[in-house]
Amino acid sequence: MRAATLHTARWVLPMSRGPIDNGGVAVVNGRVAAVGAKRELGWQCKNSVDHGEGVIMPALVNCHCHLELSALRYARAQANSFTDWLGWVVTERAALSPSEVRDSAARALSGVLDAGTGLVADITNTGVTSSLLGESCLHAVLLHERFGLFSTGGEVGEIAREESFGSPANGVVCGLAAHAPYSTSASLMRALKREAKRAGRLFSIHLGESADEVRFLRDGGGPLRDFIAQRGVPVEKWRPPGVSPVEYAQMLGVLDEGSLVVHAVELSLSDMEILAASRASVCFCPRSNANLGLNKARLEKMLGMGIRAGLGTDSLASNHDLSIFGEMSFVAERFPGVAPKRIVEMATIGGAEVLGAAEAFGAIEPGKPARLIFVPAEEKWPTPFDAVVALHDTNGLKWIGPEED
Ligand SMILES: [Zn+2]
């Protein structure tokens, strides 16, 4: 412990236990050696850094983003509906050069770190973010996403082999994603889930995001049918399952404890019960949903049912920024039934569990890597949770990373 550096602040939020007033975290060789009251740890450490009025907490976890869509700005979309917006994304994306995609993703990635996020689940269709993430100190679950309404799923084994499923490298662990049930065949969804499960990796799917999706699955009609037909896909040959998105995913066997359902907005009570029973996790993206004019996910209800949950920003094609602090303050304002403590849990320990990374992220505990951040907080807040969810401006955020021990 003498070699440890003690980082202290008005509050320490370990997340695996309650907040510590006048707390400290002792760091040795990039790992947490101890966490507790400053007065108890102070005499044991040779060096100490007092960060002052604010909160030391674990680096945040973003459970859903698409860095490779970072050149798109949703404010330019001028879409009147979810399906309009989807069409705009497809058109804009096709017009981007590979260097635009890569450069904008690199800038966005740097913004993610500046906003105190240490781990992201990033969706990729091209693999372009793989090397960017591998070179950065941002850790990632990189989810290779596929779609195809008439795909047989035969390509999935090859995807898994090509995308280095062997061993995690440079802080990047791979997984697989099916885009959504309105864009991905039953065979392809099943094959992606099967391969992810075989490799012990995360499987993710956008599910229940919009009323257009619900309609298309129910009877094959609505705006998504027109959208798909306009792209030359023989949508008339597609047989709608006639059930809700969650029921469909359940029927296909793609929901279990290794599955991450993104959005979960258009869910009935029975859908929520299916989800809870399946032990699948949910990633809520409330700002993206609001920006696209979609309904609100029933966070209070689903959290009350014990569904594991994290927060995601989704991409810059549907959000102002990729800050999880922004997502937390939005939830605090728009979902008054969700306690600040619960919101911070989703952004830290809950998100880490959702991504299968709780051994290294989401909490400050002895033996874990010291991926910590400090954020300033005014004295007026009754608890550090209130202070954290009220933080709109992350200018005063500091990393207390392994390099500073
Ligand atoms: Zn998404």
Image (cartoon, rainbow, N blue to C red):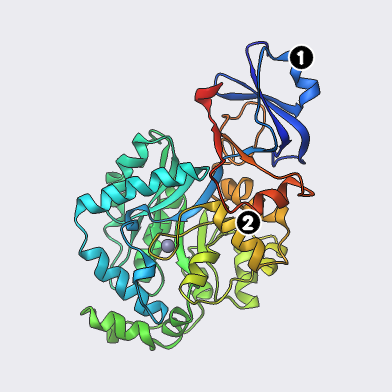
Q: Quadrant of ligand 1?
A: bottom left
Under mark 2, the amino acid is: Arg
Task: Tell me which numbered mark, 2 or 1, is placed earlier along the sequence.
Answer: 1
User: Which residue sits at x=71%, y=66%?
Assistant: 336
Q: Nearer the viewer, residue 259 or 354?
A: 354
Q: Is residue 127 above or below residue 266?
A: above
Residue 374: x and y, percent? 61, 37
Residue that numbered label 1 is attached to? 43
User: Which residue sits at x=26%, y=83%?
Assistant: 229
Q: Is residue 184 visible?
A: no
Q: Is residue 191 above or below residue 56?
A: below
Residue that numbered label 2 is attached to? 308
Q: Count residues near mark 1 (Cα–Cα under 10 Å), then give few for <14, some for 14-19, many for 20+.
A: few
Residue 22: x and y, percent? 77, 32
- Assign a secondary structure to mark 2: loop
Q: Is residue 14 visible?
A: yes
Q: Nearer the viewer, residue 296 or 46?
A: 46
State how many labels appear: 2
User: Which residue sits at x=45%, y=61%?
Assistant: 320
Residue 256: x and y, percent? 55, 58
Q: Nearer the viewer, residue 368 or 330?
A: 330
User: Which residue sits at x=39%, y=69%?
Assistant: 75
Say which quadrant the N terminus sits in. top right
